[in-house]
Image: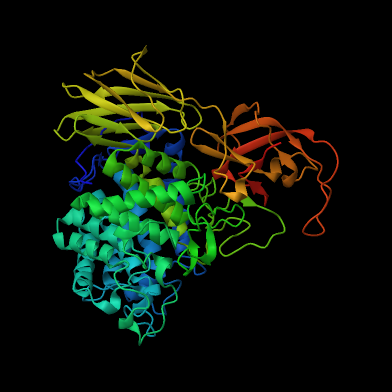
C-alpha cells in the first residue's frame, strides 16, 4: 500500500479580534511523501465563530491558565516543580507520578499551538521560562526524566513502568511544535540532544530493552522531530521502536535477573509483532499511540505491510470494540483473548459494557489522532467520520463546559448507589492522582483547527465543519482562500465562500458524513448533480472565482441507533444521535417520581429540537413524548416479579453526551430501552 502525495487548502470567515494578530507559523515541516492528503500549516486554518471557535477561545483564556494552576498545585500528580528542582532552583525529591513530565510537555505543546494562531506574548514568555528549566534539568548526555533523576532509588531503564519513553516522546513532539510555532531552537535543541542519546541506546537493539517502553509516544515524537530537522536517524529510530513490539517472546530470557515486568504481553501490544497483529488488545492508550506512530512511519516510508496492518486493526476496532461515542477501552481490569492480565484495555469482541466502561480520555483522543493520520494516508472519509465522532462526544465529554474541571473515565451510564471503579469519580476534579487527560484535551482543542482542512494536487479537502477561514497554497504553489460559515453541529447548513483560487480548475472535496442521507450541494444557489454519498467526499471541480459560494446542506433529523445484537448490553436499546452528536439522558431532567430504569423510548419518537443558549454553555436539546413503566419501588434483591400496570406518558429531554456531569451528581444513560 504505497500512499501518494496530496495537499488541501480552505479559508474561513471573520476572525475574532484576538486572532488577527497571528502570523504564519515560523518553521513548517515539509510534506510527508507517502500520504494522499497534506495537512495545512499551523495557522493557515482558523476558527472564527461557532462551536469550535468558542472552545479554542476557552482553551486560550480559561483551560491553559487553570491547568497552569493545577500543575503548580502540590496535590496534583503532574508537577512543574520537578523542573525547578532539576534546574537547581529548589531542593526536594521527585513529586507525583512517573509520567508527570509528559503531562507538562503536553501543556507546553498546547500553548505552542495557541501561540501559532494568537501570537499571545504571555504564552511565549511562559513557554520560554519552563523550557529554560527543562534544558537545565537535562543531563549532559541528553537523558531527561525527573522521575529517575530526582530519585536515587531508580535507575535509568530499570523498569518500563517508569514511563521514560512516554515522557520523552511528548517532549520531542512539544519541541517540534514549539519550533514550528515560534521559529526558536531552544526546545528543539533539548529534543535533538535527547534523540541523539536515545539513538545511541536503542539503535543497537539491546535484547534486554526489547520490551521498552510502556506508552510509545516516542515513535510519534521521533517522527515529529525528523520532520522539522531532516535528521534521518530519528526516522530510523522511530522504525526501530515499531519493530521492537512483539520482537522477543515473553518472558524475556535476557531480563531474567531483573524483577518481573508487571504488565507482560498483550497489555502493551507486545506479544505479537504489529505487522502480524489481527486484533486490538491491551491498554487502549498505548495501542492508539503505537498505531499513531506506525502511521507516521508509514507516511514517511510508504511501507505496505505496516499500512495493511493498520487498516486491519482499524477494521477490528471500529467493527467490534468501539463505543457509539468513538470511545475505546472497555476494561478497567480484565484478561486479553490470549490470557494476559490487562487493565485500561480493549475487551473481547463486542464486549462494550455501559456503566463499567473505562474509556480513558487519552485513549479516546488517541483514537481521533490515529484516524486523522489514517485519513491523511488514504483520503478515505470513513476515518474522518470516526475522528469527528470522537471530537464531538468522547473527546469533549472529559472537560466541564466551563473548562475548569475534568474526568478520566467516560462511561455510557452512571447509576446512584453503585461503587465506582478505578479512576471513576462522581464529580469532575481540578487536580487528580493521574493528570494525563486534561493536557490531552487542551492540546487537542488548541490544534483541531489544523485538522479541519487538507490539500492535494488541485484540490482542497474539507474534513470538519465550523465557522473558519483558510489561507494556504496547493502543491503547485497556487494560493487558495476560503471562508466557512455554519452553525454546525446544531445546524446542517454549511456555506463556503471562495476568496482566492487558482486560474485552473480546482476541486473542493466536501466530506459527507456517514449519517448524512440526503445531503445536497449548490454553487451560487444552483443545485449540482454531483454524488453526495454518505461516508464519502463530494467532489466539486470547476474554475473558481472570488465570490463564488458553495453550499452544503446536511440533514440533521434525530435518529435512533441500535448496536449489533452480539453487544449483549445494548440489546433492545437505542442511542439517539443528531448529526455527529450523541445524546444522553440525565436523571436531573426526569419528571419527579420517575426512575431512570423506568424510562422507555417509543420506536418512532416525535422530536422537538430546540437550542438553549443558556444551558450548559449553549446546547441543542431533544424533547419527545416517552413512557415510564411501573417501577415497583426499591429493589430488595437480585430478581423480582415484573410489576403490574400500564406505562404512563412522560416528557423526556436529552442533552448532548459531552455535556453530562456538569450539574448536580446525577444518573445518566446513553442507551435507552424501547417501549
For this rendering, which residue is in front, 567 or 297? 567
Percent x, y for residue 595? 76, 45
Count of marks, rendered view: 0
189 lies above or below 93 = above
Q: Residue furthest bottom?
A: 257
Q: Is residue 366 left or right of residue 221?
A: right
The reply to whether residue 126 is visible in this rendering is no
- In the picture, the quarter occupied by the C terminus is top right
Residue 445 located left or right of residue 547 = right
Residue 15 in picture, x, y percent from top left: 36, 32
Residue at the (26%, 23%) spot, across then down: 499
Let me know if residue 426 appears in the view.
yes
Residue sitting farthest toward the right = 644
Q: Classify 307 as above or below 623.
A: below
Q: Is residue 479 above or below residue 127?
A: above
- In front of the other: 540 or 551: 540
Report the coloring of the rendering. Answer: rainbow
Residue 163 percent location from the top left of the image = 37, 70
Q: Residue at 38% across / 81% down in the picture?
A: 151
Q: x, y percentage for residue 437?
A: 46, 57
| Depth check, front residue: 385 or 472 | 385
Residue at 79% x, 41% y is 592
Amino acid at each position: 500500500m504505497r500512499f501518494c502525495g496530496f495537499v488541501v487548502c480552505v479559508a474561513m470567515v471573520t476572525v475574532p479580534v484576538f486572532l488577527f494578530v497571528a502570523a504564519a507559523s515560523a518553521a513548517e515541516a515539509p510534506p510527508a511523501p507517502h500520504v494522499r492528503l497534506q495537512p495545512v500549516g499551523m495557522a493557515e486554518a482558523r476558527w472564527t465563530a461557532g462551536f469550535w471557535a468558542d472552545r479554542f477561545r476557552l482553551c486560550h483564556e480559561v483551560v491553559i491558565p487553570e491547568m497552569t494552576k493545577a500543575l503548580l498545585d502540590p496535590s496534583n500528580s503532574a508537577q512543574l516543580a520537578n523542573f525547578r528542582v532539576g534546574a537547581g532552583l529548589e531542593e526536594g525529591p521527585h513529586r507525583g507520578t512517573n509520567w508527570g513530565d509528559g503531562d507538562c510537555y503536553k501543556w507546553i505543546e498546547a500553548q505552542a499551538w495557541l501561540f501559532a494562531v494568537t501570537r499571545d506574548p504571555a504564552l511565549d514568555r511562559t513557554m520560554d521560562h519552563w523550557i529554560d528549566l527543562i534544558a537545565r534539568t537535562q543531563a549532559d548526555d541528553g537523558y531527561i526524566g525527573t522521575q529517575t533523576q530526582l530519585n536515587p532509588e531508580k535507575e535509568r531503564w530499570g523498569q518500563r513502568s517508569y514511563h521514560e519513553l512516554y515522557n520523552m516522546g511528548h517532549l520531542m513532539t512539544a519541541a517540534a511544535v514549539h519550533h514550528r510555532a515560534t521559529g526558536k531552537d531552544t526546545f528543539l535543541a533539548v529534543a535533538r540532544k535527547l534523540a541523539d542519546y536515545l539513538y545511541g541506546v536503542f539503535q543497537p537493539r539491546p535484547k534486554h530493552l526489547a520490551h521498552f517502553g510502556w506508552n510509545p509516544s516516542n515513535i510519534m515524537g521521533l517522527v515529529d522531530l525528523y520532520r522539522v530537522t531532516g535528521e534521518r536517524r530519528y526516522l530510523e529510530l522511530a522504525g526501530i521502536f515499531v519493530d521492537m513490539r512483539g520482537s522477543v517472546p515473553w518472558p524475556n530470557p535476557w531480563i531474567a535477573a531483573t524483577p518481573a515486568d508487571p504488565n507482560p504481553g498483550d497489555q502493551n501490544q507486545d506479544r505479537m509483532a504489529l505487522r502480524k497483529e489481527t486484533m486490538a488488545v491491551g491498554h487502549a492508550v498505548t495501542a492508539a499511540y503505537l498505531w499513531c506512530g506506525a502511521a507516521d512511519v508509514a507516511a514517511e516510508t510508504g511501507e505496505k505491510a505496516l499500512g495493511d496492518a493498520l487498516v486491519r486493526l482499524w477494521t477490528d476496532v471500529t467493527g467490534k470494540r468501539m463505543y457509539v461515542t468513538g470511545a475505546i477501552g472497555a476494561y478497567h481490569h480484565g484478561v486479553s483473548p490470549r490470557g494476559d492480565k490487562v487493565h485500561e484495555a480493549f475487551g473481547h469482541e463486542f464486549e462494550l459494557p455501559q456503566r463499567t466502561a473505562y474509556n480513558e480520555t487519552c485513549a479516546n483522543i488517541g483514537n481521533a489522532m490515529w484516524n486523522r493520520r489514517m485519513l491523511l494516508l488514504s483520503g478515505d472519509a470513513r476515518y474522518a467520520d470516526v475522528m469527528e465522532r470522537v471530537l464531538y462526544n468522547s473527546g469533549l465529554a472529559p472537560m466541564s463546559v466551563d473548562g475548569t474541571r475534568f474526568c478520566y473515565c467516560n462511561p455510557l451510564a452512571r447509576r446512584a448507589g453503585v461503587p465506582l471503579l478505578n479512576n471513576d469519580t462522581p464529580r469532575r476534579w481540578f487536580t487528580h492522582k493521574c493528570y494525563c487527560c486534561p493536557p490531552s484535551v487542551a492540546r487537542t482543542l488548541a490544534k483541531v483547527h489544523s485538522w479541519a482542512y487538507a490539500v492535494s494536487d488541485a484540490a482542497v479537502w474539507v474534513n470538519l465543519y465550523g465557522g473558519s477561514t483558510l489561507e494556504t497554497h496547493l502543491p503547485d504553489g497556487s494560493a487558495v482562500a476560503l471562508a466557512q460559515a455554519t452553525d454546525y453541529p446544531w445546524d446542517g447548513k454549511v456555506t463556503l465562500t471562495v476568496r482566492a483560487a487558482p486560474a485552473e480548475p480546482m476541486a473542493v472535496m466536501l466530506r459527507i458524513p456517514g449519517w448524512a442521507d440526503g445531503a445536497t450541494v449548490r454553487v451560487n444557489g444552483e443545485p449540482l448533480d454531483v454524488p453526495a454519498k454518505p461516508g464519502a467526499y463530494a467532489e466539486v471541480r470547476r474554475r473558481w472565482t472570488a465570490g463564488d459560494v458553495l453550499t452544503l446542506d446536511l440533514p440533521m433529523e434525530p435518529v435512533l441507533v441500535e448496536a449489533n445484537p452480539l453487544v449483549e448490553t445494548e440489546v433492545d436499546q437505542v442511542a439517539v444521535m443528531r448529526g455527529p452528536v450523541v445524546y444522553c439522558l440525565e436523571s436531573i431532567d426526569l419528571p419527579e417520581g420517575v426512575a431512570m430504569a423506568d424510562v422507555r423510548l417509543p420506536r418512532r419518537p416525535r422530536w422537538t429540537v430546540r437550542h438553549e443558549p443558556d444551558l450548559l454553555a449553549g446546547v441543542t436539546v431533544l424533547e419527545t413524548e416517552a413512557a415510564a413503566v411501573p417501577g415497583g419501588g426499591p429493589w430488595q434483591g437480585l430478581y423480582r416479579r415484573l410489576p403490574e400496570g400500564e406505562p404512563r406518558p412522560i416528557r423526556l429531554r436529552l442533552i448532548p453526551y459531552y455535556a453530562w456531569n456538569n450539574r448536580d451528581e446525577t444518573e445518566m444513560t446513553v442507551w435507552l430501552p424501547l417501549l
